Image (cartoon, rainbow, N blue to C red):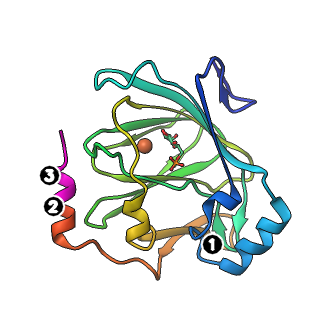
Amino acid sequence: MVDVAKGELRGATNRYTKTLGDLAGLYEDEEAYRALLAEMGDKVVYEVTDYKPSADAGDMIIGVTRMLPGKVGREFFLTRGHIHANPNRPEMYYGESGHGLMLLESPAGDIRTVEIGPRSLCYVPPYWIHRSVNVGPTELVMTFAYPADSGQDYDIIAKAGGMRSRIVDDGRGSWVAVDNESYRFRPAELVESIFAKAR
Ligand SMILES: O=P(O)(O)OC[C@H]1O[C@H](O)[C@H](O)[C@@H](O)[C@@H]1O
Ligand SMILES: [Fe+2]
């Protein structure tokens, strides 16, 4: 059962939590990050509860992500983000409550945003780096499913200096994607090696 109010999967076998302190270096405004961190301490900013039947390619991990609303400076709260370690594995997200978006980036640096709200279904295609962002005033709760042998590779984002876009407050009650000044495009050989990794 998806407990939408609690933002969790009842009967989950795993629980994974992140505090703001776990997300050092991800936000553009270092000063705002330190100030908010002092305020929030070790409060959980996002949480994943899931059920993993096995790690077999033919199995799926199903679960729920719950994210607090908030901003670091002008930048909305985000998840760390990753590409699947088996990069050709896809994922789907289903909006339960709140207003968020999926920030998607191809290895070559193409960007897409998919808005997520109740009853929207977001498809993350194979090879796309993905990160969830809560752009609303309430908790964002999403159900997800992905192949059980996908794995997560976080280095791909770190090595590029972050994702190509940042999702920030537009000052008029909505969000806008702006360029991440620290972003470095991946060299062609690295892009090719990601596609060559598929098995
Ligand atoms: O792995 P992160 O980038 O911290 O994102 C948090 C979570 O996002 C999704 O819900 C994935 O399906 C989870 O496997 C992942 O752990
Ligand atoms: Fe994923």
Residue type at numbered disc 3: Ala
> Is residue 113 inside the magenta stretch?
no
Q: Which residues are magenta?
A: 192-199
> Which residue matches tag 3?
196
Which residue is at a point 40% across and 60% down the rendered structure image? 155
Q: Secondary structure beneath disc 1?
A: loop
Q: Is residue 18 left or right of residue 186?
A: right
- Label 3: how many Cα within 10 Å (few below 14, some 14–19, many 20+): few
Compute the Cα span from label 1 to label 2.
Answer: 35 Å
> Which residue matches tag 2?
192
Residue 148 place in picture, x, y as percent: 38, 29
> Which residue matches tag 1?
170
Residue 54 place in picture, x, y as percent: 40, 20
Q: Secondary structure beneath disc 2?
A: helix
N-term mark: 1 or 3:
1
Q: Compared with residue 106, is residue 165 higher up or lower down, i.e. above or below?
A: below
Q: Is ligand 2 closer than 8 angstroms to the Cβ of mark 2?
A: no
Residue type at numbered disc 1: Asp
Dots 1, 2 in contact, CB < 8 A = no
Q: Compared with residue 196, is residue 178 higher up or lower down, i.e. above or below?
A: below
Q: Hey, which residue is sitting farthest right in the picture?
A: 39
Residue type at numbered disc 2: Glu
